[in-house]
Amino acid sequence: MPTLRQLEYLVALADLRHFGRAAQASHVSQPSLSQQLRALEQRLGTVLVERNQGSVELTPIGRELAERARCVLVAVEDMRELARRAQEGNAGTIRFGVTPTLGPYLMSNVILALHRQQPGLRLYIREGIPDEQALELARGQLDMLLGPLPIAGEGAIVEPLFRERLRLVAAPDHPLAQRPVLRRSDLKGAQVLSLHSAHHLHRQVAGFCMELEMELLRDYEGTSLDSLRQMAATGLALTILPDLYIRSEVGGSAGVKVLEVKDWEPTRSIAAAWRHGAAFADAYASIAECVRCEALAIVGA
């Protein structure tokens, strides 16, 4: 019979379509992953992976087995979770994924509130790219996640929580910062900085640039919200930052000015997600409600 590790490798390869990335996601070397998948093929007596130069595709039977393997892995992880919760009590440890453009600026308030409500609850918080964490949720490697909509992934319950304004900022001496009234039409041709393209925020900013005919500077992608703010403060370009970051003590607006555009108020929607049928769905829903309350206390309804 196939081993659980072999099934994990097959699902990772189905999700990522790349041996190196699948090995990295599985915390194993690429040769080991490739060797185990060949062993799985030999055990099953069929080809699961088409190994073409420069691309990786699963065969039809490989895709079918990967989906069934995903169900097996999630079921096994749920059994482990049940056993872990039985040892730890009703609260236990939640493996919680969150986007780095949100977590540092909200989760401290959420953790304090949860600790008051459920002193025995523990959150193992891991920051990551939302699309990647959605795959980890589907594979049972995370219990729930918090990130911007849309959240991809089959078999997930997605609970919208709140809407957050996105703020256009610039150096105080930027020409646009000197105008008494700023309109959408004034932004045409303005240069804008954003995060790496793997981030959901980057895709939103790119959409705003297309909508308003601004220029997205792809040669100066930031590695964090702090780096975006700091580059904008030097006068390099405008940038767009989440409201929770602007309001937070660990983020803020030091060195930049928030620009109010009279006829433009961009936002993003934040949601929580967990697997459909999860054994502790009620606990995840209560955590999501706590996140909603704490966020709305900061940004308003």
Image: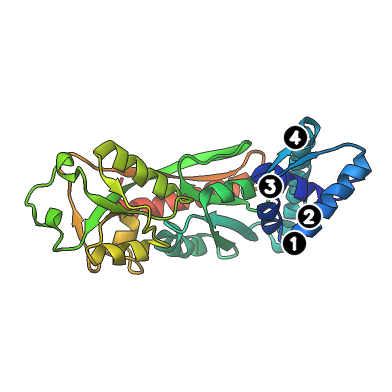
How much space separates mark 2 and mark 4, taking CA atoms? 17 Å
The tag earlier along the polypeptide, 3 or 4, is 4
Q: Mark 2 points at which residue?
A: 33
Q: Where is residue 271 in the image (x, y as percent from the top left)?
A: 47, 44
Which amino acid type is marked by label 1? Ser
Q: Mark 1 points at which residue?
A: 29
Q: Do the residues labelled 2 and 1 touch (CB within 8 Å)?
A: yes
- The quadrant in which residue 189 appears is top left
Q: Residue 63 carries which label?
A: 4
| Mark 1 vs 4, N-terminal side | 1
Which residue lies most toward the front here? 53
Question: Which amino acid, by three-letter code, is at mark 2?
Answer: Leu
Q: Which residue lies furthest to the left in this view?
A: 180
| Front-most of residues 227 and 54 | 54
How crowded pointer 3 is (Cα within 10 Å; few <14, some 14-19, many 20+) is rated as many
> Which is in the foreground here, disc 2 or disc 3?
2
Q: What element carries label 3?
A: loop
